[in-house]
Each structure stands twice: as C-alpha cells, then as structure tokens.
Image (cartoon, rainbow, N blue to C red):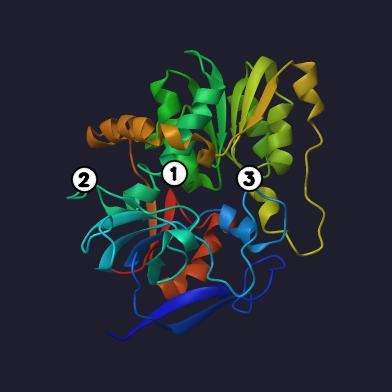
Amino acid sequence: MSRTNRAYRLRRRPAGKVTDADLEFVTEPVGELGDGQALVQTLVLSLDPTNRIWMSDHRGYMPPVPLDSVMRGLGVGRVIESRRADLPVGAHVLGWTGWQELTVADDSALISPFTVLPDPLPAPPSAFVGVLGHTGITAWLGLEILALAPGETVVISGAAGAVGSIATQLAKSQQARVVGVAGGPEKCAHVVEDLGADACVDHRAEDWHDQLVAATPNGIDGDFENVGGPLMDAILDRLNIGARVALCGMIADYNQFGDGSEPIGQRAVGQLLMTRSTLQGFLVLDYAERFAEIVEQLAGRWATGKLRAEETVVDGLENAREALDQLFTGGNRGKLVVRVSG
C-alpha cells in the first residue's frame, strides 16, 4: 500500500525564534516495511522547551538533531501496520515518534524502543506525555530532590506550565507553603485558585520582585527552578540556610541559542555558598528504572481527582512549529501538545 508522510525536517540552526526556514514542513513517500519493522501513526506530539535546545548546536544532554533530519520529539501513536510480534497492529505506543505523522519503528533507527501502553488505554493519549508521562515524572523527581518538610516554603517558577502545574499540586500535598511564579493575573489566579498555591508572583508585573519578597517573608527553603535568568537570581537571594534548588530548566536562555547573544546566566550563584545550599540539576531520562513506580503513584492521584492534568491542545501537525513558540511567550497553560490524528 502506497502511503505518504508529513513531517518537519530541520534545515538550519535557528537564530532566536524558530521559523519556517529552520523547520520545513514536507510531504514524503513511505516505503514498504521490512522484517522487524512496524508503522506507527502519531496521535499526540509533545512540545517541550528542550525541543529548542535540540535544534541548536548548543551542548546538551542529547546530541543536536542533524540537519535535514526529521525533528526529534516524543509522542503517543498507534501501530497501523506491522512485521514484528512485539508491536501488533492496533497497539498504542509511547516513544520517539518525531515531528511526523508516520514513524517506522525500527529499533536500530530509534533513540530507544517504543513502549506498548495498556489496552485499553486508562487515560487519554495526551496524558502519557503529560501527567502520566515524562512531565509528571519530572515534577515528582524534582520534589524528591527538594525533600520538603511540612511548613517549608518552596518557590515553583513556571507554575502554570506543564511540569510546574503538577509540581505545585504535589508540593501542596506535602504540606509545604507553595509560592508559584507565572505570567499575568489570569495565570496567577489559576495557580492559586485551581492548583492550590498559597501565593503567586506575576513575573510580568513591574513590581514582581516586591511580590516575591512579600510572598516569602520567612525566606525560601526550596526552589523548583524552570526559568533561570533574573527571576532565579531573585530567588537565590532569598534562600534560607540549607535550602535546596532542583534545577529542571532555564527556559529564559533557550530562544537565544544561535542568535549571537550571550546566555543570560546567573549573578547570585554565590548565595549557594553563603547559605550552604545545594543545587542539583536532574534529567528525567536518568531515572528510567523508576518510571513505572512513579507513574503508578501519579495515576492513583489523577484517578481520584487529587491531581489535575492541565493541557493546551493544538490541532494539526502543520501548526506544531508555530505552537512551539507558546512555550516561550507563555501562551500555553499546563502541558502543550499537538493533536496529530485520531
């Protein structure tokens, strides 16, 4: 059967905001499957800040996406044709679909094999790249690093975003005093009223620094850091003795890659020394052996209504490139995904 695939290929390294000239949307034929291959139709594509890092030649935890290759990305798909017993037709799978409608599942050509999901699916496909996937797992791991005691104050930057919205809820379940940081009054209201934070700092307001000071009168014991830049400096300046920082992301820098700008960097790192605090960077990929255990915990909370799964859904693969910019402009709330098909 003759098939065609629509995909994004990385034609050049972006300088600042990603453009159509950087990511070209193409239509290509799909060849016949060989032995040991399966054809996966992408249902949902995850959009993550790290996508922007992968497009650049900046040093990262994975190699840059080679030029002219299909853009790297995680997704949930359904097997529609198969010549391998472990990926039967009709199975739902999680893995490196790439930014494309159809993926040939050949383990030698993938970063890691696809994971077959339960049948029937216990949650919508998007949940497996969100609250029950790498997003939720990241929030869980970051809070383990912070090891919050009841009553301690934790600041969660990007609190209305994918990881931050889950981390906010989990931190409250640990009886911490949670101060979120988000962009704009509407998002701050959401962080407090829907996610349960005790306060929220509007980083777009002129008095955001004063808001941070007012929200943390007794200092900061934990920082779940997703942003970096001046906001992180202000948080470091308020750390208590023995505070912990879980460094999840520094999105303030990502869209500058390739445009000739110097990274924003941090000026207040010395406060880690003055307060004898610890800073630990972490990557969800380093904890693969714990995924099942953590997802079971998250699933229990989600199924009983103790954990909200916030999502922003964009329809159509052709809109993925423009949708990515929402991560840097604050256009999304919760997990940002593209509904590709089904």
* Near-viewer residue (254 or 150): 254
Q: Amino acid at mark 3?
A: Ala
Residue at the spot x=63%, y=76% of the render? 11
267 to the left or right of 306: right
Residue wearing tag 1:
134
Q: Nearer the viewer, residue 340 or 38?
A: 38
Q: CA distance from mark 3 to mark 2?
A: 41 Å
Mark 3 Cα within 10 Å, few/some/many (few <14, many 20+)?
few
> Which of 155 and 26 lies nearest the eye of the viewer?
26
Q: Earlier in the sequence, mark 3 or mark 2?
A: 2
Q: Position of residue 53 (x, y in %)?
A: 64, 56
**Which residue is under mark 2?**
122
Residue 159 in sight here: no
Q: CA distance from mark 1 to mark 3?
A: 31 Å
Of marks 2 and 1, which one's residue comes earlier in the chain? 2
* Residue 241 visible to the viewer: yes
The residue carrying mark 3 is 205
- The answer for how far apart the CA atoms under marks 2 and 1 are is 17 Å
Disc 1 marks a residue whose amino acid type is His
Label 2 sits on what residue type? Pro
- In the displayed structure, would residue 333 be above or below residue 140? below
> Which quadrant holds the N terminus?
bottom left
- The circle drawn on residue 182 is none
> Disc count in the image?
3
Question: In the rendering, at what x and y percent does residue 64 appear?
Answer: 65, 60
